[in-house]
Structure formats: structure tokens, C-alpha cells
Amino acid sequence: MEKTKISVVSYTNTLPFVHGLQHSPIIEQITLSFDVPSRCASKLIDGQADLGIVPVAALLDIANPQIVSDYCLGADGAVNSVFIFSEKPAREIKTLRLDRQSKTSNGLAQILLRHYWKQEVTIVEGNADAYVEIGDRTFGKQQLHPYAYDLAFHWREFTGLPFAFAVWVANKPLSPAFVKGFNEALAYGLDQREKLIEKLPSKSDFDYREYLMENIDYHYNEGKKAAVSMFLRLMETLEPHPINHYAG
């Protein structure tokens, strides 16, 4: 039987999912690859993977995307790993450098600057007033810049909604039995978070327990679904820019 090809983001926030998949019977039915968010999306778009934890902006680009899980990578407040780092207050930012790893976070940054902070910015490749950065690269980095804007926190302030950065998406129909076993594996991994945290290295400037148990909200609930719908509508109002065409 051909195995289901799954692309997983190679960040700390997916550790519970990966642990669950690797320590459940579903492992016999899958092959895992580890990628940055934009690569996860492009693999689903190009058919190199069957299923992946995909940045929500990619839902606009995947033909017939099928969300197969009630689990996601989201937040109901500060997420502590998706930021605009800036040398100026948000309402004074004129130029912004985007992050090549995730169109979702780039779009969220531009949406908040335009609609929340009422600031039109120019997207640049080089030196900028501010830049978007996501994932483990941001851990402990908030003190290195005068201003660090947590995008999930400010989305909540702007909309009153939580946010989902990535959801589990298939690009083809999967059997109900496979989907059931897949979700059971994810749930098992989430139940093992405390044990996983004990194995992570100690950092004086970052709290892994707070991050995995409190900052990341793994449940794809109705509030996050409403947020994704609103986000995708707002994404379509942004002017195209070359870096925004990196999938995801």
C-alpha cells in the first residue's frame, strides 16, 4: 500500500504533532518530511505531499483544499513566535521587509499595518524600518529591538478573534479510517506535551512550557475558522508583491 506523504513544519510548535505521529500506529501508513511553512504549502500545491500542516494563506492556492483535522497551529492572544520587529512605533513604519518562510505572516503583518495601525508601508528587500520574522528564530529576540509586535496578539485586539496560522490540509480525499487514526495520533502527541518539554534545552530568555502549553492553541475551533475566513478576505485586498508569491 502506498504511504501517505505528510509535510510538517520544522519548528518547536509542531513537536507534539510529530511525537504523536511517530509514536502511534499511523506511522506505518505515512512518510514524514520536515520543511519551512512556505515549503509545506508548495509541496501540497505541487502534489509532492498529500497532507501537510499548511499556512492558511495557501488555502487560496491549493486546488480543492480539504481541512482534515480539528487541530491547528493557532493562538488566542500572544503567540510569541510571529513578530514585526521594528526600530520605530508601528504608526511610524514606512518600509517593511518580509519573511520568505511564510506568506501568511507577511500578509497578517500588512493587514494589521493597514487596517489596525492605519499605516501604508513599502515592501523592501533590504534595509527597512521593520521586518517580519517567525518561528524558532524569534525565541528570546524581543529585547533586541525597541519594538516587538506579536501579530497574534494584535490580530485579537483588531478583530476580537483568535488566529490560526496553519491547518492540516489534504489535496486529495483521504479515507475516513486514515483521518480518524491521524487525528488520534495528533491528540496523543498533545497529551504528551509535558514530557516533551522536559527534554527541551533550558533557555534563560524563553519559556518552552509557556509557549507549548499556553501561547500555542492547537484547537481549530469556530473562532479560528471565522478568523481564517476574515483573514483570507483581507489577504485578497493586498497589492501583489514578488515575495508574497512564496506559497504559504
Image (cartoon, grey):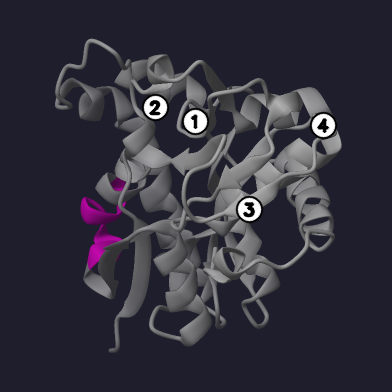
Give whichever of discs 2 and 4 has the lower sequence position: 4
Residue at the spot of label 3: 123
Q: Quadrant of residue 207?
A: top left
Q: Which residues are magenta?
A: 20-27
Sequence-earlier tag: 2 or 3: 3
Q: Earlier in the sequence, mark 1 or mark 3?
A: 3
Which label sits in the foreground, 1 or 4?
A: 4
Q: In front of the other: label 1 or label 3?
A: 3
Where residue 176 sits in the image (x, y, percent)?
53, 71
Binning the other alpha carbons within 10 Å of mark 1 as few (below 14), some (14 to 19) or many (20 upward) gives: many
Q: Which residue is mark 1?
A: 216
Mark 3: which amino acid? Ile
Q: Nearer the viewer, mark 2 or mark 3?
A: 3
Residue extending furthest toward the front:
127
Q: Which mark is residue 116?
A: 4
- Residue 32 covered by magenta stretch: no
Residue bearing mark 2: 212
Left or right, residue 195 beside residue 127: left
